[in-house]
Structures are given as C-alpha cells and as structure tokens.
Amino acid sequence: MADRADELQQAVRRALAQGRPLALTGGGSKGFYGGEPVGEPLSVSGHTGVVNYEPRELVLTARAGTPLEEIESLLAGEGQMLAFEPPRFGAGATLGGTVACGLSGPRRPWSGAVRDFVLGVRMINGRGERLRFGGEVMKNVAGYDVSRLMCGALGTLGLLLEVSLKVLPRPEAEVTLVQERGEEEAIELMNRWSGEPLPLSAACHDGLHLHVRLSGSPTAVAAARRRLGGDPMEDGERFWESLREQRHPFFQGNKPLWRLSVPAATPPLALPGRQLVDWGGAQRWLVSDVPVEEIRHQAAAVGGSATSFRGGDRGHAFHPLPAPLKRLQRRIKRAFDPRGIFNPGRLYPES
Amino acid sequence: MKERARRKLIQALRAFLPEEAVIAGEEALRPFECDGLPAYRELPLVAVLPEDAGQVQQVVRFCHEHGIPVVARGAATGLSGGALPLADGVLLGLSRLDRILEIDPLARTARVQPGVRNLAVSEAAAPHGLYYAPDPSSQIACTIGGNVAENSGGVHCLKYGLTVNNVLELKVVTAEGELLTLGSAALDSPGYDLLALMNGSEGMLGIVVEALVRLLPRPERQQVVLAAFDEVEKAADAVGAIIAAGIVPAGLEMMDNLAIRAAEDFVRAGYPVEAAAILLCELDGTNEEVSEQVRRINDLLRGAGATEVRTARDEAERLRFWQGRKAAFPAVGRLAPDYYCMDGTVPRRALGEVLRGIAERSRFYELPVANVFHAGDGNLHPLILYDANKPGELARAEAFGAEILELSVKVGGTITGEHGVGREKIHQMCVQFGPAELEQFHALKAAFDPEGLLNPGKAIPQPRHCAEYRTLGDTRTPPGERAGNG
C-alpha cells in the first residue's frame, strides 16, 4: 500500500518539460497488446492499495497499480466479484492496466464490459494536472463521462491513478453444461437462449462443443439446466478461466491470433484457420495467417471489426477508423495530451 | 436588424426544408420556449423540425457555416433546462424522426430514430418477449435521443443499468454537419469509446439521429414487497442490509412520510400512512427464484426493523404499489403551489446523514420537503415545497436546494444522478469540479465542436464564471414551477 501519486505527477511533468514520450506500464502483463510501447517506461505498479471498499456500497476504489489478484481475492472474501471477469494474462496484472486495455472475459455479454463498471477515475492528463472524474456513486451525470473514455484508451489519454468500480455479488450457484453441436447451430442456439429469461453467464463454441454457463439462485439454475440440456462439466470454472486467460489449447501455437468483434448472431465466418466462438457469438477468436486485409474485410462486411491480438503487425493492431472518426479521435487525444507524451502509437499510429 | 437576420435565416432554411418544418413567429415558437423546467424560458430565432437525418445534417452544416448556435430537443421532458433554446440560435426538434426502423428478435436489438418514445421501444419489442430496460418515469413521453443526451436511468438501473449500458450504436451529426457512426452492432468497436462519452453529454458533442439499443428478455415473474418503518434511517439501513445479503433487486425505492401521504391521497395505493418511510423492493426472475427471494427479503426487512412487510397479493396490487411511487411527484405537487425537485446521488452509507441534513435545513428554511428516491443507487429526489407568490420563498427554496446539492458532493456524491446539469445546476458544477477538470471538459468539447455551436452555455461552466460564483455567492435564477418527474 503506497501512494506514489506525487512522484508520478513529477515524472509526467519532467517528461512534459523535456518533451520526452512516456511508455506507461503496470504489471507488464499486457505489453504484447496494441502498438509497440515507445518512450521512457513509467511504471504505475508501485502506486498501490485499496482506498475504499464497502461491500454494502457495491463499490471498490483502488490505486491503479493494485494487483488485480489482490482486488479479486478481497472481493471474493466478501462474496463479491468483478462481473466483467477481466483477463489477467500474468500474475502482475494491475487495475490500471486492466482498465486501460479495456478487456473483458466470458461474462461480458450478460454483465457488461469494464466500461460498464467504471464509476470514476483520478488521473494525470498530458498537462501534468491531477484530475478527478465521476466518483463512487452508481448514477452520476455531472460533466462528460471521462472515466469511461479511459477504458480501452491504452493509456494514450492520461495516466490512471485511481479507479472506482461497481462490483456485484457472486452468484449463489453456477453450472457449466456441454453438448455436441455444430458451429452454425451453436451460434443460433446461443442467440435464441439469450432472448429467453435464462440465467446465462457465458456461452462458447470451441469447434466441437457448445459450452454454456448458468449463474444465479440454485432454483433458477436448476430450472434452466432442465430447459437447456447437455452434460454438466466437472471443472466448469477451470474451463472458463482457461478461455479467459488464453491457456485453452485453442490458443497454443505460433500463428497470429485475431480477435473479431461481430454482431452476436453472425453466422460462421468463412476464414481459413481455426476459430473459437465466445461471448454468445459476439467474439470470434481466429488463429490464422490469412492476410490482414482479408480478415478485416470479412469482419467489416458483417458489421464488426478485427484486432490483431497477438503475433501480428503491431503497427496496425486495431481496425482502421473511417477518416472523420480518425480526425475526431486525434483531436480528442490532443485535448488530453497536447504534447503527445503518453503511449505514442500504442492505439493507432501517430501519423 | 435582428428581424432582418431572422427573415434571411428562414428563407435560407426553407431552401432545403419543407415550409412547415421551419417555425417562426412568436406565437408559433411559444411551445418551444422551455423544457420540463419552465422557470427558464427563451424564444429561439427559429425552430426547425427536420424529417430525416439528411435534413438534420443540412441544418447543422448551414448553422456551422454561419456561426449560428443549435440546441437539439427531443420531447422536452428534461428537468434541468438542457433543451432551453437560445435567443440567437436555432432550436432543432427531432420529434419527426420517430420511426422504429427494425426490431431484430434474434440479435435482441432495436434500431430507432431519436424521436421514438422510450416506452414505444418496449411496446414494439413485447411480441418477442423482449423489452428496453432503462425506464425513466417520463417514459411515456421522453425520447431515445433525449435519453442518450441525459444518460437517463429509471427505477431499474441498479440491476439493468443506465442508458449508457443499453445502447450499442449511435449515428451522430457533428457540429460540422458530418455523420459519424459510434459503436456498432458488435459489443465493442475500435478506438476511443465515444459511444460511452455521447451518453449524458447533453447535446453538446453531437446530435443523435439514430440509435441501436439492446433488448432484454422479459423476466418470467416480477413481485413487489412493501416495507414500512417508523424511522427514515432504519429504512436507509435496510437498503444496505439487502445489498449486503447479496441481493440486487430489480428496483428499490423509498418514500418518506410526506410523500407517502401525498401519494396515498392521490392514487389510493394502499400505503401505510403512519409510516415514517416505506421501501418498495421489486424482485424479478423465474417463478421459483422470485418466491425464494421474497422469503429472504421478508426476513431481512423484519430484521432491519420494519414495522410491517407486505407482498403484493396479485398483479393488480403490484401495479398499485408502483402507481403510488410513479405518481409521487404530481401527488406532492398538489400539496403546495410550487415545488423544486433535486437530483443528488450519494453513497448509500450516507443516506441517513443526508436525510438528517435535509430535515434540519427544512426546519431552518421553514419549507417542507418530501423525499422520494431511488434508494438502491442512492439517487435522491427531495421535493422542496414553496409558494412563488410569497415574497422570499423562491429564494429560500433555491438556497435550500443548493445546500442539498453541496451536501451531496460533501459526502462523496454528485449534484445530478440522472436529470443532467443543463442550465439549472451549472453553478453547482463549480462545487463538484475544480478549474483543471472544467478546462479539460472544455478541451474535450472543443475537439468535437471547435466553434462551440452545439448547446452552448449548458452543462459545463466557464472556470472564470466559477471564480465569480465562489466569490460573489449565490446568483441562481428562479427554479419556479415544475412539471414532470423522475
């Protein structure tokens, strides 16, 4: 538990005065994601500690360098959780890095993403000022929602010092059901079931089997289990964790890994390589060495986008933006970081 | 001079808009002079009612070219003067963009124009067993475009989220008249999350011309439990006890004695009129799940000191319990010639302290206050009763209101949970934010709207204005008579 906000602010001010870009880091667990880090490393991982946690409020506030593991075990002790199930991708994963990367796990379609749970932030902008947006309350419409804007911005808009999150009670009962289904049929089932009042909390198709997780009160889970059929999985939780952390055999190998974010009901995508359908159809993992253009073209054709997640061209990791949106995003970047000192090129190339 | 400029403007707008879509003349403009906060009134130069996104773009482009401010307006049910016209500006009404373009039951989405009413989305989705979750009390009238601008909540947002959590994609016309698509039918999109940023931006960053919203399956069963308490603070503690037990109710509302009596007089909901406070707790889910939760909630409420706990015997009684809550604003409105509705949100742990503080100030200012609020998420709606015709009462109501908002900030909350800052709470923004945050808001606004033509003068005060506010003290303008509810 250490408050390093003053040191971090000084470091930002020094970089600003000298015009040196900074590569903001947390635990370094997601350094592979997005553009290659450029600039002098500035680690936030020493700025740690849970500042406020009252289970009755369903809110937790912690400094950005606090390990995710510490936060999640603290929550578990009170029967609560981060409902967006953030992937850690390593022991050092911090809260700040989690929010900056904006990644969410299997529960995302039903519970929401990181951005749906962020209530407030304290941050340092590119002028070296300490700012506070949002707060610790569930509803807050005073001022623009800068806190949510920080989610997935990969630290290009500011250095996160502290984050307040909405947390939720852990479900009383949980079961994972497995049944053999083809990909097309599985996608349709996942979507149909999502339209019924069932306590779904994860749904994935690994190429052979449809995996569905049910979470809620024991009676609701039991009733839904009868309705959906399939065999209960012994170690269901391990399965979802291996998927979230990309330790599942699907993710092994040296070929580039793509993440396609598409409308959930999109039929199977005809792309060479291996595919895994997660998020009830809304997230398609693809292991393939097909040219970038073809993958992006297919994702865009169905109304989605494609991210080069691992092992691809880091200079163009994210789906290109239409020109007007690109201009606007650059203006937003300048509004927060006029000298361009934070994480240059981590999200999109600077020029 | 102004008249000549107005005539030229009308002529120019009629070049690309149908004649009846351009409204001018004092009589014709009168209905557009205010939103749900009629204390603030202003006639715009002209009002326009375009019929499609292309016409919206043309209007905005024209105004951009000529440096004319634009204020967008949906159903004008807002309670903070966010859609208040500007005397030198164009009022852009979106009421004619009122078509539901598509309901996709498999994808569970609705594509709608901004002028579609909130409730109409759920009605159109109902045959598929689906509904649109955010349900502000004005949902019969308020529109999706306005809901996005205000990030509207409702009684179910603790469990189902606000507008920001239920919108997938927006088509937005920028200050320069460009059409942008933010978000998509997928769950996330590349680049900064501008979709999130648009929600609650009060028409300052862009004008929504189309929205794709998420639909949820209707729960199998809903049930309401009513609990009475002999002390307001016990009711506030019961809220914490329910959450601590791991239950997230679909709705958790609280009313104090004055509100209970007013509602009971008005709609005969069957409320216990002697109670200091009541809690209404809605549970939803499968049939068995709800039965089980009702049992647990009963025990929790009794354990928290409830003097009476009642479960609605049938659907008619459930609806009656809610009707009382929904009618609370107009019901309280019958108790005095005027009322002033506040909208602070506080951490739940501070509910008792804040309610005590409100009661003390009520005695000090000699103005009664009725408390009706979304207890589950700490969003308070104190209704200050006054009579604008009695000298000094209006000023006392304003001062009282400002103190409630400042108290909300002091205990770690916010000046507005769901009604927006608009024109009304612009001074209190100075209490919640310092100069650096305000400058950052303005820089962000300038990235979208460099000339400051979209709804200028609302939501974000100028830092120098705050310096004046802090040194000169209160300069608030009259809140006056209120309509609508929250």
Image (cartoon, coloured by chain):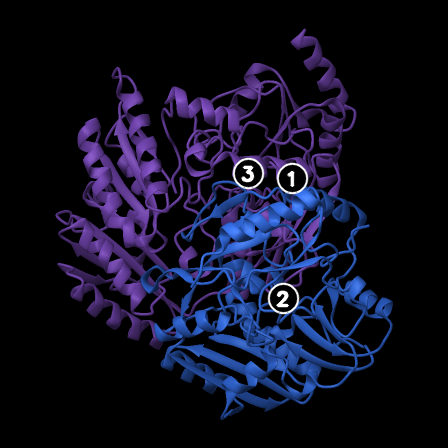
Which corner quadrant of the image does residue A346 belong to? bottom right
- 2 or 3: mark nearer the eye: 3
Which residue is denoted by mark 3 in the rendering?
Answer: B202
Q: Residues within 10 Å of mark 3 (few under 14, many from 20)?
A: many
Does any portion of residue B194 appear in the rendered image? Answer: yes
Identify the mark nearer the N-term, 2 or 3. Answer: 2
The picture's colour for chain B is purple
* Secondary structure beneath label 1: loop
Which residue is denoted by mark 1 in the rendering?
Answer: B206
- 1 or 2: mark nearer the eye: 1
* Secondary structure beneath label 3: loop
- Which residue appears at 23% of the width and 40% of the height? B357
A293, B484: nearer the viewer: A293
Residue B107: image tag: 2
Does any portion of residue B265 appear in the rendered image? Answer: no
Q: Amino acid at mark 3?
A: Glu
